[in-house]
Image (tube, rainbow, N blue to C red):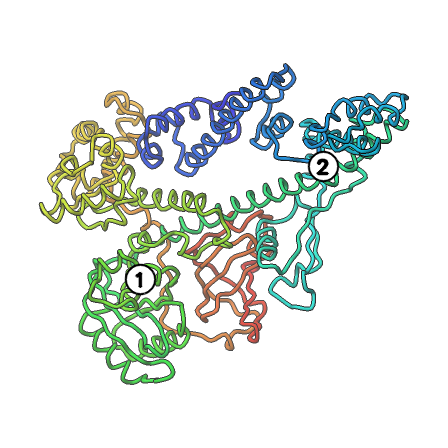
Amino acid sequence: MDIISQLAQELKIRQSQAESAVKLIDEGNTIPFISRYRKEATGGLDDVVLRELNDRLAYLRNLESRKAEVYSLIEATGNMTEEIAAALEKAVTLAETEDIYRPFKPKRKTRASIAREKGLAPLSEFIMEQTLASVNIEAEKYINPDKGVQTAQEAIDGALDIIAEQVSDDAALRKKLYAVYLAHALIVSKATDAGNETVYINYYDYNELACKIPPHRLLALDRGEREGALKVDVSVDEEKQLRIIYKMFVKAENDNGRLVKTACEDSFKRLIHPSLERRLRSELTEKACESSIHTFSGNLRQLLMQPPVKNAVALGFDPGYRTGCKVAVVDATGKVLDTAVVYPTPPKNETEKSKKILKSLIEKHSVSVIAVGNGTASHESEVFIAGLIKEIPHKVSYMMVSEAGASVYSASKLAAEEFPDYDVSLRSAVSIARRLQDPLAELVKIDPKSIGVGQYQHDMPPARLSEALGGVVEDSVNNVGVDLNTASVSLLSYVAGISSAIAKNIVLYREENGKFTSRSELLKVSKLGKKAFEQCAGFMRIHNGKNPLDNTSVHPESYEAAKALLAKCGFELSDVSGGVPRIKEQTEKIGVKKLSEELGIGEMTLSDIISELAKPGRDPRDELPPPLLRTDVADINSLKPGMVLEGTVRNVIDFGVFVDIGVHQDGLVHISRICDRYIKHPLEAVKVGDIVKVKVLDVDTAKNRISLTMKGI
């Protein structure tokens, strides 16, 4: 099966879709561009499917390249046969390909290679024939003190080492044995020191079928082993494995047959099992990592796409104890208006003085929302803020905001350039306020790995994790679009076709020449050529520019079609600035299919243009439920089983979801308590940022644990 057919089959898409997508990728187009502006070619494949296709395409091409390389290497040894060529053709994984190459691969010094150097290969062939001829008599011919063979038994032992390696190198055998490992092997763990209680106590005497073990448990075992708390092994039915080996290699019940049997046992215990154990665990870990990365990516996508709190002056409150709580007030555009440091928490407990300072800031700048960081001293700070709000005559709300990554950003070179006059903690307060105002614009400044909405992210392969999360950020930024005249370098660098260097050049051009007035002006930016312009232009927005289409996601390549559409529907280009909601009604009267043919563009592209003209510059995040803002705070001690509360999903992991119910400690809804239907993963039912109703099942104040359910409410 060729690569295109395989991609179509695996991703359950049409062959023509796979073929077009691969062609567009090979032409250097970005995933966001293909997803948004080449829908006709791909049949409307979205960015998630396209990224999966791109990843799989890279793997399959690497596999084909390796298979061709292995073919050449085996051919060079003079050992290529029709059977080997056919096996290579059928290989579907890199591991399978390496197993085929294994017998011909140059080896480091092994017991078998030493035996071959002693000239014992012919004796191993004699034994493998398994005739009735005496092996002892035959072995005496190979006694050669000069080569280190002192006795007949030493010769036989060396020959058996050669046979053991031949058995281990047999690709067909390894394939059969590994199938048994995949279906029936157990992952077994024991404590390295049972008397020393650690967080891995649940795995001190544990076993589970490898094919059934959930990713989060597998990753916990891996970490426990790395930290020296656990010893993890793979256990299989040895007798069953040996019977498979005997069936392939033991041909007679005589002395030579029994020697072959002995070599098979040695091969399994010394060579095959350790090798297949490593392979199984490596593949299980790889799958668990991919699953974890998938979950992390899904959570990150939802976090980045959280609705912004628009047109609000926000106060960022970064909690602390001894060094005080840092405060920053930012206007609706994110510009810093004021800063302060207050000490309402221990050890100073200057509650009234702190209230006075904050009331003054709130009144002076008309603050309507407060963002409270959820780090150290956050509970005391939340209680303080809730009390403060009650004393303010006009409506002010607050929201707990995740501080994950804020310290990383605050200490970064980027933050230092942005706020050279502020210390690290004040920068953090600014970041917390901006995260509430526009999560996407602020979170792109932080390494996605530091945002903290995954599980075991520090155990993931760094390059793969960065690639996956970077793709999520890129898709999110391009889905929303960026304001070309206000976007930061960090935000611009995630726009399709724009590198960090070009992003810096865009900002430099803006600083030297003033605001952009048209998208075409981008072509004047240093290093931004026609290809980069093609990829990025549709995702850039210019408010109040020369052409109202520049404030939409309509691509410049479709401007003429958009103008013709407006004319056919009785509108002017100038009407676009305020939106043309009636255009949908007009196009339905004329007929989308007819218009598509007359304008020479695809129906999918035409539908996108119509939506944009009806509501230019629309933000897809505005269609989501707004964030849950609070005016009061509860305490874990006030929770009782049976209470029904409203909360925000903060994190989704394999075994459940964590929900913020306003008591500082997030509650856990186990996967079995999310919904009435069966789900394999919580992401099938909920996502980060969802506002959900939950019922309290149990509260353990000693361990600070809250058990919740979403069922039966």
The amino acid beneath tag 1 is Ala
The amino acid beneath tag 2 is Val
| Picture residue at 62% right of the left edge, 40% below the top | 279
Among the two numbered marks 1 and 2 on one chain, the one whose residue lies closer to the N terminus: 2
Q: Is residue 362 above or below residue 237?
A: below
Res 180 label: 2
**Element at label 2:** helix
- For residue 547, what is the image quadrant? top left
Res 283 label: none
**Res 369 visible:** no
Q: Which residue reaches farthest front?
A: 146
Q: Is residue 553 above or below residue 229?
A: above
Where residue 83 appears, x then y in whole percent? 65, 17
Mark 1 — residue? 411
| Picture residue at 40% right of the left edge, 32% below the top | 45
| Picture residue at 48% right of the left edge, 62% below the top | 659
